[in-house]
């Protein structure tokens, strides 16, 4: 009986000892399976602190707007267009790309990004912050009221296969190290935003046509009564020229204000330039107004606003360059 009790106690103590050894093993030595990447998780991107959580960075602005997916390898948020307009509020810091996916939909609406004190960048060679791939409609970048926002890239900061709208009532700074700051087909500015093009490796604003309105009609039409500031522009501040299948034009209405500091040419087009607003340009290296080399004809320039190039006032008149 004593031997049986002693044996039982020995087995019990041994089992407790083994269990305590397992529990005492450091967590770092326990092998665990790596978690699958979460589609909307954010990388550190080499910064000293993590970017905001997705729910803090991106918020749908209406019920029809779905959350994007995220590709962690390329630091790319992927947005889809839909039959209803998709709109997002973007807040805080992010390094990477916002890609609006190509679509197989025959009917779809554009997409709007409402910047709410957003600081967005892409440090990849040739990389864009906003890249719009669908072949119709537009990408709209809106600076919300009383906010300061920036979009900085090594490549074209805001690039669209079709149109680009810049609007709102806040401030947005856009910069490209090696390419255009903004590139699209029709580039339209409306609202009361302050748009600062803070440097570009090529053109500041580049496309087919430039307008200071939203293209609407009658009472629905929205015009631009804000300010566009451009500085450290390597090529043209505004380059809207023929590229085989269109004729480019530039239109500045009376309520628009443009300030340019340092560029090769201020305006480059191949058909018509309308300067009805206030334009002040200094540090012009080559010409105030230049035409596309492929255009053998002159450019019609209609001046009715306050226009000054390198201190020389261009009197209201009709010119042919």
Image (cartoon, helix red, strand yellow):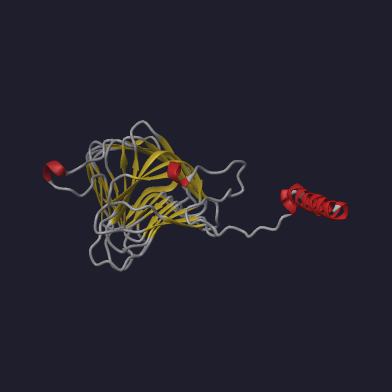
Q: How many marks?
A: 0
Q: Is residue 236 visible?
A: yes
Give the percent coordinates (x, y) of residue 182. Answer: 40, 51
Q: Residue furthest front?
A: 1
Residue 259, by quadrant, is top left
Give the percent coordinates (x, y) of residue 272. Answer: 25, 53
Q: Residue furthest top?
A: 146
Q: Is residue 72 above or below residue 218?
A: below
State the residue in front, 113 or 194: 113
Residue 27 shown left or right of residue 197 in the figure: right
Residue at 28% in and 46% down: 62
Give the percent coordinates (x, y) of residue 115. Answer: 38, 41
State the residue in front, 282 or 210: 210
Give the percent coordinates (x, y) of residue 270. Answer: 30, 58
Q: Is residue 285 visible?
A: no
State the residue in front, 238 or 103: 103
Residue at 58% in and 57% down: 35
Q: Residue furthest right?
A: 3
């Amino acid at each position: 009986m004593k031997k049986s009790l002693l044996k039982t106690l020995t087995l019990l103590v041994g089992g407790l000892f083994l269990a305590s050894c397992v529990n005492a093993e450091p967590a770092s030595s326990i092998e665990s399976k790596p978690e699958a990447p979460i589609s909307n998780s954010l990388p550190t991107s080499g910064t000293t602190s993590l970017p905001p959580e997705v729910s803090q960075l991106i918020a749908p602005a209406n019920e029809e707007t779905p959350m994007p997916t995220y590709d962690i390898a390329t630091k790319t948020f992927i947005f889809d267009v839909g039959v209803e307009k998709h709109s997002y509020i973007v807040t805080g810091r992010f390094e990477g790309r916002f890609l609006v996916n190509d679509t197989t939909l025959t009917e779809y609406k554009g997409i709007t990004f409402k910047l709410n004190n957003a600081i967005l960048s892409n440090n990849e060679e040739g990389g864009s912050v906003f890249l719009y791939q669908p072949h119709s409609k537009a990408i709209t970048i809106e600076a919300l009221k009383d906010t300061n926002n920036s979009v900085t890239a090594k490549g074209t900061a805001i690039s669209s296969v079709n149109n680009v709208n810049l609007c709102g009532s806040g401030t947005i700074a856009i910069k490209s190290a090696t390419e255009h700051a903004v590139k699209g087909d029709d580039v339209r500015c409306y609202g009361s935003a302050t748009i600062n093009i803070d440097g570009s490796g090529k053109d500041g604003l580049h496309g087919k046509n430039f307008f200071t309105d939203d293209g609407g009609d009658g009472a629905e039409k929205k015009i631009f009564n804000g300010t566009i500031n451009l500085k450290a522009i390597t090529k043209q501040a505004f380059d809207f020229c023929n590229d085989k299948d269109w004729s480019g034009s530039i239109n500045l209405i009376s309520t628009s204000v443009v300030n340019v500091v340092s560029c090769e040419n201020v305006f480059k087009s191949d058909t018509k330039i309308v300067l009805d607003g206030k334009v002040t340009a200094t540090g012009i290296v080559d010409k105030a107004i230049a035409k596309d080399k492929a255009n053998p004809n002159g450019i019609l320039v209609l001046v009715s606003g306050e226009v000054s190039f390198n201190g020389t006032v261009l009197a209201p008149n009709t010119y042919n360059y």
